[in-house]
Image (spheres, rainbow, N blue to C red):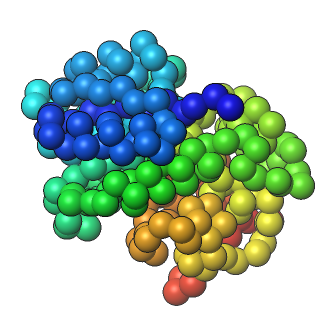
Amino acid sequence: MTKSTVLIIDDEKDLVELVFYNLQKEGFLVRSALDGEAGLASAVRELPDAILVDLMLPGIDGLEVCQRLRSEPRTARIPIIMLTAKSAESDRVVGLELGADDYVTKPFSPRELAARIKAVLRRASPQSSAAPSAVIRRGGLTIDMGRREVACGGKTIALTATEFRLLHHLADHPGRVFSRSQLIDATLGREIAVVDRTIDVHVTGLRKKLGQCGEWIETVRGFGYRFRE
């Protein structure tokens, strides 16, 4: 079985060594970079399966790294986990808005980090969802499950793995209202701790990327979201 490669972008050498050692024990191939520019170059060159990015980096910070990874076609779909010593919700929300798939607050346990990496890799895998509809078309919106591609008005839109699963799940059940908790179960999984606000952030980012096609996702006040029939 091919091992998944994880890139760590963090300037704390002791932490990088700890994560490096523990992820190798979990069967991952691990690469590292000590600043944002080196991390971006490594990501584009090696195309890892997942990327861990510290929020506080010398030079360009983790938020800009995340933003630039998402704007680069070669790295746009690689799962990203933000590492941050900041516990404020606003910091986590900004990271998610810029395209991160998940976040881990320092200090964290190596086992928790490994579990979160495995979770985002499962969500990013084409085989991770046994959806009955291979291609969904709603007006100008096309969702191709096999190709993991989304297009609006014929223009391809780069989504994160989490955004893709969220959109596909809603679109595959038009008219059905899902609570935030149900969407967490369906798209993120309960093996990791997340809050309802996480879904709101992903929906906001999804609508922004979809442009006019974002109107298909409706907010049901006091409950959750649905895909318009």
Q: Residue at x 40, y 22 (%)?
A: 43
Q: Residue at x 87, y 44 (%)?
A: 134
Q: Position of residue 14 (x, y in %)?
A: 15, 40
Is residue 212 at all visible to an observer of this figure? no
| Nearer the observer, 15 or 206 | 15
Q: Position of residue 182 (x, y in %)?
A: 63, 76
Above or below, 212 relative to 61 = below
Q: Position of residue 170 (x, y in %)?
A: 71, 62
Q: Residue at x 38, y 54 (%)?
A: 113
Residue 97 lies left or right of residue 175; in this view the side is left
Q: Residue at x 64, y 28 (%)?
A: 2
Above or below, 160 relative to 60 = below
Q: Residue furthest bottom?
A: 222
Picture quadrant of residue 119: bottom right
Q: Residue furthest left?
A: 58
Q: Quadrant of the N terminus?
A: top right
Q: Position of residue 6 (x, y in %)?
A: 43, 34
Picture quadrant of residue 190: bottom right
Q: How many marks?
A: 0
Q: Residue furthest top?
A: 45
Residue 188 lies left or right of residue 170; in this view the side is left
Residue 209 lies left or right of residue 34; in this view the side is right
| Nearer the observer, 50 or 4 | 4
Q: Quadrant of the C terminus?
A: bottom right
Picture quadrant of residue 56: top left
Is residue 203 at all visible to an observer of this figure? yes
